[in-house]
Image (cartoon, rainbow, N blue to C red):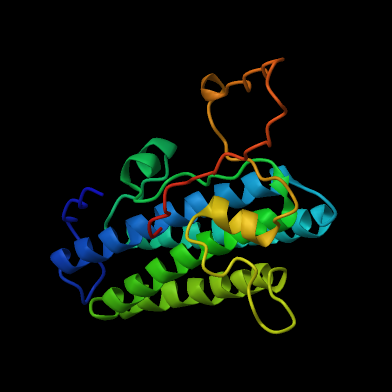
Amino acid sequence: MSPARTPRYTVPGLGVDEGRQVIDLLTLRLHALNDLALTLKHIHWNVVGPHFIAVHEMLDPQTAAVRDMADAAAERISALGGEPQGTPGVLVKERTWDDYSVGRADAIAHLGALDLVYTGIIEAHREAVEKAGELDPVTEDLLIEHLRGLEQFQWFVRAHLESSSGTLSNAGADTEVAAAAAASPKRATAKRTPAKKTALPAPAKKTAAPAAKKTAKKTASKRTTR
């Protein structure tokens, strides 16, 4: 992410260089929150299976709350003398993570992957809280309030993944596709890929004995911190 320009003014009690540092912190948090809101809607549209309605309806309030968090972050950037960037192009250019990688899939599979998304954004928010605490307690307080909501939403997600012994079904998975498969191994999950990359399997030779089907190992780039 390119650093923000130093503002001509900022809030009383902060120097303009300190204001620029806080704006930089908030800009990446704004991108992460906007991305999360879009990801939640993507999952809302693409869940299937017996848990469809429960998960479908659980995600809309989360989306609305995350959009409010993004709005608060953007307005804080403006108050600090900065210029919040909310266009998709800037988000994609400046983010440090890849697109969400699961398409139409079982609801529990999506929750397994979404748990990793929440982990990434929460960890990055906590790092931002620590840095903001050295510069601006108001921004620190704003991000802590975000964390309260984000951690509650992750709890809602993990309640679907937790066993009675307290173990998460996606424990140890470090990619969204792997987490989805671990959370719901009996339900197929689909990684979104461009159509031109899709190929039909070659027909079996008539003279050959039937061969055991091999399942191609699905891979996904490890999600970097949001």
Nearest the eye: 86 or 125: 125
Nearest the eye: 187 or 127: 187
Nearest the eye: 142 or 126: 126
Q: Residue at x 63, y 20 (%)?
A: 200
How many numbered discs sit on the rendered protein? 0
Residue 28 in the image: above or below residue 191: below
Residue 140: % across, % down: 36, 77
Nearest the eye: 37 or 138: 37
Question: Is residue 208 at all visible to an observer of this figure?
Answer: yes
Q: Residue furthest bottom?
A: 165
Q: Residue at x 16, y 55 (%)?
A: 6
Asked where in the image residue 18 lies, by quadrant, the reply is bottom left
Residue 42 in the image: above or below residue 67: above
Asked where in the image residue 218 lies, by quadrant, the reply is top right
Residue 88: % across, % down: 44, 38
Q: Residue at x 70, y 56 (%)?
A: 185
Residue 21: % across, % down: 21, 64
Seen in the image, is 34 located left or right of residue 20? Answer: right
Residue 34: % across, % down: 49, 51
Question: Is residue 60 at all visible to an observer of this figure?
Answer: no
Q: Residue at x 41, y 78 (%)?
A: 141
